Each structure stands twice: as structure tokens, then as C-alpha cells.
Image (tube, helix red, strand yellow):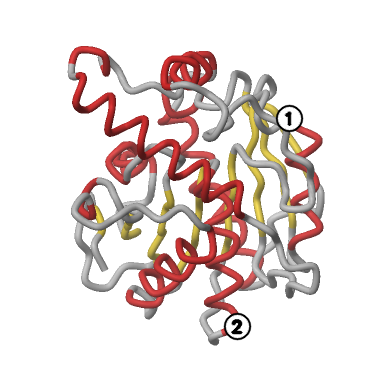
Amino acid sequence: MIAVRPRSLENPALRLLVFHHAGGSAAAYFPLVHGLPEDWDLVLPDLPGRGKRHGTPALDDMESLVAVATEDVLDWAGPPIAIFGHSLGAIVAAEVARAVQARGVEPVWVGVSGRPAPDQRVVTGLDPYRLSDGELMRELTAIGGIPHRIDEVPEFRDRFIRLVRTDLRALGSYRPAPDRAPLAAPLTAFGATDDVLAPPLSIAAWAQETTGMFRQRLFTGGHFHFLRNSFPNFARALGHEIQRSMSRQTGAPIGATRGVADVR
């Protein structure tokens, strides 16, 4: 699998695979490694069309994205695996977890962030078919989704816009199967108090996607707040959620209950 690995471990205690947001790449999540235990292997796959897969055409339908990402995850199966994704990556992470579960690989934990649960109606201004490039840039700027100093390199800006449009079309193509099997793994849904793309109530509905323990974690700020302003805090929260789930599975007392929510 083509992926970024901040530190390469031969026998990790855990392998955490992280899927990025629309228009993003694996590199944006590199700082997570600084808040995770030293014996965890952080694996950051690039979806087609960017980063280490920049020479591969980007995919504009969710089914194809999930199929590629599923094979990526299976390539790294062996040590216990946890799967996380933000925004576009949240849908990829959940559906990949469901797919590998069906193939006999059970994640110890699944995390989703910045995305309403599959059955929630999503209303955004990010229409890849209706908006001009300038309008789409303004919408992305409003939620903090524009790379720093992007206008200084017009070629990069234009490529970024094309990639965002493709990713948004993939999100628009997503139709959760009504008879989908629930996840068995513990699930944590992360959200932000001022996220207009994924309000807290829509995040809470992820509880219906698993038969395992469910927790909701809320941070103050908007859709990209933890990426821009509080990555160390988020990394620690991410590690804590995974450790809590692993402790519960080994029978250690942790005091967690289904449906817990907190705000940072």
C-alpha cells in the first residue's frame, strides 16, 4: 500500500490508519504522530489523485474509493488495527471498517470526525456542479479548508480545485445501503461545536452505526479547527479513545458507557 508512515515499526502494538478529508492528502495528518504512543504505527494512506498517488486518477464515486481503501487496509492487517477518518475520510473509514469486518478483519476501534452519520441529511453550500471556482474557493475559505498561501501558486490552486470537485462528487454519490451490517467495533464520533457541515446532533446519530460502545467527543470551533489550531490536543484525545476501547476489550475497568459526550 502507498502510504505515509511517520515512523516505521516492525511489530507495533497497534496500527492506526487515517483517511483524509476532501481535497486533502495524507501529509496533513502527519502531526498526529506526536500525540500517540511510541509503539503505535501511524499509517496515512493517500487516496488516488494526490500525495504519493498523484499519478493515479482521482475517483469520483464512493464505492470505488472504498474498494481501493479496503485493499489498502487489508495490506496492513496483522497487528491490531484502528481506523479513523475526517469529513470525506469519515465515510471512507466507516465503510472500509464494515468491508474488512465482512472479510474477517475486526478493527479494535473506528473513529469518524466532521461528518454527519450516513442516515442524516447533509445540507452544504459545497456544490461541485453549481459553483464556479471562485465561489467554491470562498465557501472553502469560510470553513477553513484552503491550504496556506495557495493563491501564490496558480497551478497548485487549479489542481486543488479540480481535486476538491472530484472528492465532493464522490461524497454526493454515497448512498448507504439500507440493509448494511452494523459495525461491531467501538465507535467514537468527533465533532465541533460550530461545524456548519456536521452539527453536533448529526454527529450523535453515528451511534446507530455500531453495536459496540459509542462515544461522542466535541471540540470547540469549526470544521477544520483541530487541523489548524489544536492538533496536539486532538491527537491525545484520539489516542485516549483507542486505549479506552482496547482496555474495555481486555476486561480492564474503564468506566465508559454508550452515548458519552464531552466538550473540549
Viewer-closest of 258 and 52: 52
x and y, in percent, of residue 81 in the image = 45, 68
Left or right relative to 217: residue 208: right
Element type where label 2 sits in the image: helix
Residue type at numbered disc 2: Ala
> Which quadrant holds the C terminus?
top right
x and y, in percent, of residue 134 in the image = 43, 15
The residues tagged by marks 2 and 1 sit, at their Cα atoms, a distance apart of 30 Å
Numbered label attached to residue 199:
1
Q: Quadrant of residue 57?
A: bottom left
Task: Give neighbour class at mark 2: few <14, some 14-19, many 20+ (Cα, 10 Å).
Answer: few
x and y, in percent, of residue 109 in the image = 57, 62
Decide: is 260 above or below 128. below
Left or right relative to 43: residue 16: right
Q: Residue at left 38%, top 64%?
A: 15
Viewer-closest of 220 and 9: 220
Q: Look at the image and tell me whether residue 11 can be seen.
A: yes
> Which quadrant holds the N terminus?
bottom left
x and y, in percent, of residue 246 in the image = 57, 65
Q: Residue at left 42%, top 36%?
A: 164
Residue type at numbered disc 1: Pro
Left or right relative to 51: residue 64: right
User: Mark 2 or 1 closer to N-term?
Assistant: 2
Q: Look at the image and tell me whether residue 42 can be seen.
A: no
Q: Quadrant of residue 180?
A: bottom right
| Residue pointed to by mark 2 | 102
Left or right relative to 146: residue 263: right
Farthest residue, direction bottom: 104
Element type where label 1 sits in the image: loop
